Amino acid sequence: MPIKENLNHIQSSIPKHVTLVAVSKTKPITDIMEAYHAGQRIFGENKIQEMVEKHEAMPKDIEWHMIGHVQKNKVKHMASFVSLIHGVDHFKLLKEINKQAKKQERTIDCLLQIKIANEASKFGMTKIDALEIIQSEAFSKLENLRVTGLMGMATFTDNEQQIEQEFRYLKNTFNELESFKTLNFNPKIISMGMSGDYPLAIDCGSTMIRVGSSIFGERHYSE
Ligand SMILES: *Cc1c(COP(=O)(O)O)cnc(C)c1O
């Protein structure tokens, strides 16, 4: 199915309170423009360099979300325009994001990535790590960033029950952390769910889904 139909199908099947991030990694600008012309304005990339190039080439009313693992030394390349960084998994990265945001005279929104999968390969912090960060004095001094929620990636498995458990764990973690609201911790977003599992993620409380292949088709990696 063409991109526009895929998008319309997904948009019409998800509740209004759920935001769709169209994951455009590896996809050419012509494909992304097709989604843009169908009304999509939020795109997710997992490599900073690729996102920078697409941002430069494309309309400026697009919101670019960094959904991949972020290397500290690359934050500066996206600090002028990125609208949400999903995968923040340690405090030093928050410090760097704050520093680069300050240089740009911006406030950058971030999500803390919580490790919900039982796979060694998935990044993320524990609930305790997250609690420690948001309650720390050092965090309260990061005036150029705002943590607006949590992000998680379920285990890559066919076992729906396991995926559901992991999503519910993220939702429960969100509920617990919600009561610790501060000036720069204002949780509203639960980013969970991809092409294979977003309906389940929404049932479990997701407010933001990251969908790639169901919109743009399978990805072909050249590397
Ligand atoms: C690639 C990616 C997605 C989208 O995956 P699909 O299965 O193509 O929908 C979502 N989240 C993250 C973090 C990704 O890297």
Image: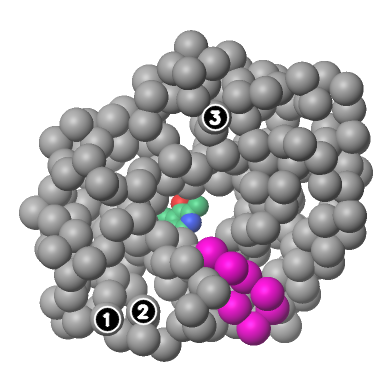
Asked whether residue 186 is in view, the answer is yes
In the rendered structure, the answer to whether residue 121 lies left or right of residue 223 reads right
Tell me what residue is drawn at x 36 percent, y 79 percent: 11
Q: Quadrant of residue 102?
A: top right
| Residue type for callout 3 | Thr
Q: Are marks 3 and 2 in contact (CB under 8 Å)?
A: no
Q: Are marks 3 and 1 in contact (CB under 8 Å)?
A: no
Tell me what residue is drawn at x 76 percent, y 67 percent: 171
> Compared to 150, does 14 lie above or below?
below
The image quadrant where one finds the C terminus is top left
Q: Position of residue 48 (x, y in %)?
A: 38, 31
Tell me what residue is drawn at x 54 percent, y 74 percent: 17
Q: Nearer the viewer, mark 3 or mark 2?
A: 3
Total labels: the figure holds 3
> Compared to 142, does 156 lie above or below?
below
Badge 1: how crowded within 10 Å, few (<14), some, or many (20+)?
some
Q: Is residue 207 magenta?
A: yes
Q: Quadrant of ligand 1?
A: bottom left
Residue indicated by mark 2: 11
Residue indicated by mark 1: 8
> Compared to 126, does 205 lie above or below?
below
Which of 16 and 110 lies nearest the eye of the viewer? 16
The image quadrant where one finds the N terminus is bottom left
Residue indicated by mark 3: 107
Element type at marker 2? helix
The Cα atoms of the two marked residues, 3 and 2, are separated by: 29 Å
In the rendered structure, the answer to whether residue 190 lies left or right of residue 193 reads right
Badge 3: how crowded within 10 Å, few (<14), some, or many (20+)?
many
